[in-house]
Structure formats: structure tokens, C-alpha cells
């Protein structure tokens, strides 16, 4: 499939960017519908996303470029050519979440509640965005003879984009369902951090284009750190909750 969807005013518009945009817009829509469940004004969700999402994209690009510096150094145009691929989800999550936490502090919004609201939409956006990797012919695994293998450059390989897309969509559904009976603020965020990181750790071992640091796969290192960190936060906050569910307003979903 041609990575270029169409050309507008002499510039190629790629499916990669279109799918990421669709994932973002759908995620914002769903978050706005669910916002009252978390005692957050929907308009504030839009405000937070208008700042956090661009920062997330910036972070995803910065992370990718840093760990591919030998390829990008000295070529500014190549660095900013985001439409040609090269975004690392962990960088996007770190920048986007950090930005959201700062804004929540400034606007006096409980950032744990906002993170609980946001992460199902993030999972859905990932499920959609991974198909952009497929169209670009990137983020695939090594050779395999499994019946669902895909062909890349004449070789049958693991469709790791598909593994993550399916997992993230199932994670989206699971997080939506469990959100209805949160035991503490931050529970949904911690579950996302644990469950996504478990999947990413194992799927990353199949990929052939992993970013590395000191000989280790960066995504696996970050995944391990996220699992440990989220488990600790989950245990501490769960103990403090005393087994009571978080108070909420009417669920609009």
C-alpha cells in the first residue's frame, strides 16, 4: 500500500499522519464524553489535550532522534520530517503525561483523575496509529513461518504492529469497563502502565528496528521501569483506599 494518501499543494500527506490524527481526535472525543465520570469539565479535557498532544508528538520525535542520532545528526530537514515515520511512543508518553501533570497542577485538576480518564483513549490511539507503521513497512518483527506473517521486502515476518494494535484495543475496552468502579484515583493509569508495558516488553523482543542504549533495547528497559513503578504506586494507593470506590458523578458512557 502506498504510504502517501494524497498530495496537497505539492506536499505528500501520508497515511501515517492521518491515522495518528484520527486516533487523537477519537481519543479526545471519548475522553470528553467520559469526563463527568471523573469530575472533570469536558472543556478542560480539550484544553489539556491541545497542549499535551503536541508535546507528546514532540517527545516521541525527540526520543526517536536521540536514540538514532548517528542517522539524523547534521541533517535538520531529516530530523523534522515526522511525516516519514520515526516516532517513539515512550517519548510521547513521557512528554505528554509530564505536560498534563504540570497543567493539572496549574489548573487545580486532580492529575490522577485526569490520567485515569486519558489512558483508555491513549490505548485506543495506539491501536489505530500502529496501522500507520504497517503502511510504512516499519516496526515489524523478524522472519517467521506463522500463518499470519506479513511480507516485507519479500520476506515473511512477524506483524508486530498487529500484535500491539490488538492488545491496545483490548486494553482500551478493559480500562473503560474497570473505570466504572475505580477503587482509587490513579488505578486505571497504573493498570495501563503495567499491562501495556508487559506486552511491549515481549513484542519488542520480536522487532528488528529497536532503539538501543548500551546494548539493551530501550523500550524493554522503559517497560521494566514502568511495570515496577506502576506496581509500587498501585500497591500504596490501593492500601490507602481502604477498599472504597472513588466517588463519581453520572457516567455518560
Image (cartoon, rainbow, N blue to C red):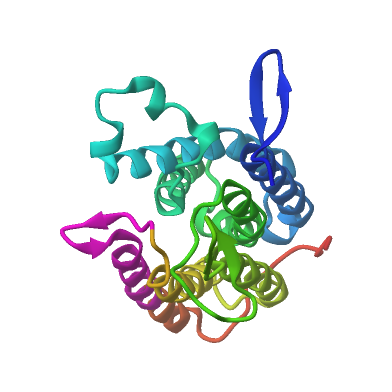
Q: Residue at x 55, y 33 (%)?
A: 83
Q: Residue furthest top?
A: 9
Q: Is residue 33 above or below residue 222?
A: above
Q: Could you say where residue 253 lies in the image, as x and y percent from the top left?
A: 83, 63
Q: Is residue 73 rendered to the left or right of residue 30?
A: left
Q: Could you say where residue 157 lies in the image, as x and y percent from the top left?
A: 52, 68
Q: Could you say where residue 52 lies in the image, as x and y percent from the top left?
A: 53, 39
Q: Residue at x 54, y 80 (%)?
A: 145
Q: Which residues are magenta?
A: 209-232
Q: Can you tell which quarter of the image residue 122 is in?
A: bottom right
Q: Main secondary structure of the magenta part?
A: helix
Number of numbered labels in the structure image = 0
Relative depth, front residue between 98 and 217: 217
Q: Residue at x 68, y 45 (%)?
A: 19
Q: Residue furthest bottom?
A: 243
Q: Is residue 64 rendered to the left or right of residue 136?
A: left
Q: Can you tell which quarter of the image residue 180 is in?
A: bottom right
Q: Residue furthest front?
A: 154
Q: Can you tell which quarter of the image residue 227 is in?
A: bottom left
Q: Is residue 231 magenta?
A: yes
Relative depth, front residue between 59 and 241: 59
Q: Residue at x 50, y 61 (%)?
A: 140
Q: Could you say where residue 155 lies in the image, as x and y percent from the top left?
A: 51, 64
Relative depth, front residue between 33 and 9: 9
Q: Is residue 140 magenta?
A: no
Q: Is residue 229 above or below residue 24?
A: below
Relative depth, front residue between 80 and 188: 80
Q: Is residue 191 rendered to the left or right of residue 19?
A: left
Amino acid at each position: 500500500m502506498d504510504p502517501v494518501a494524497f498530495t496537497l499543494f505539492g506536499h505528500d500527506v501520508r497515511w501515517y499522519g492521518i491515522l495518528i490524527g484520527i486516533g487523537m481526535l477519537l481519543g479526545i472525543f471519548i475522553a470528553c464524553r467520559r469526563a463527568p465520570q471523573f469530575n472533570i469539565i469536558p472543556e478542560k479535557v480539550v484544553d489539556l489535550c491541545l497542549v499535551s498532544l503536541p508535546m507528546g508528538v514532540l517527545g516521541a520525535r525527540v526520543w526517536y532522534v536521540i536514540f538514532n542520532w548517528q542517522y539524523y545528526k547534521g541533517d535538520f530537514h531529516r530530523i523534522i520530517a515526522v511525516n516519514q515515520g520515526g516516532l517513539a511512543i515512550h517519548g510521547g508518553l513521557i512528554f505528554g503525561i509530564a505536560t498534563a501533570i504540570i497543567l493539572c497542577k496549574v489548573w487545580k485538576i486532580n492529575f490522577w483523575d485526569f490520567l485515569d480518564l486519558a489512558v483508555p483513549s491513549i490505548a485506543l490511539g495506539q491501536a489505530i496509529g500502529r496501522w500507520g507503521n504497517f503502511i510504512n513497512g516499519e516496526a515489524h518483527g523478524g522472519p517467521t513461518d506463522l500463518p499470519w506473517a506479513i511480507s516485507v521486502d519479500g520476506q515473511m515476518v512477524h506483524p508486530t504492529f498487529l500484535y500491539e494494535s490488538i492488545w491496545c484495543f483490548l486494553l482500551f475496552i478493559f480500562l473503560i469497563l474497570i473505570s466504572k468502579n475505580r477503587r482509587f484515583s490513579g488505578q486505571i493509569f497504573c493498570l495501563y502502565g503495567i499491562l501495556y508495558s508487559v506486552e511491549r516488553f515481549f513484542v519488542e523482543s520480536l522487532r528488528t528496528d529497536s532503539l538501543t542504549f548500551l546494548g539493551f533495547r530501550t523500550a524493554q528497559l522503559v517497560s521494566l521501569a514502568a511495570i515496577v513503578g506502576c506496581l509500587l504506586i498501585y500497591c500504596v494507593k490501593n492500601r490507602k483506599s481502604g477498599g472504597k470506590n472513588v466517588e463519581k458523578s453520572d457516567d455518560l458512557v
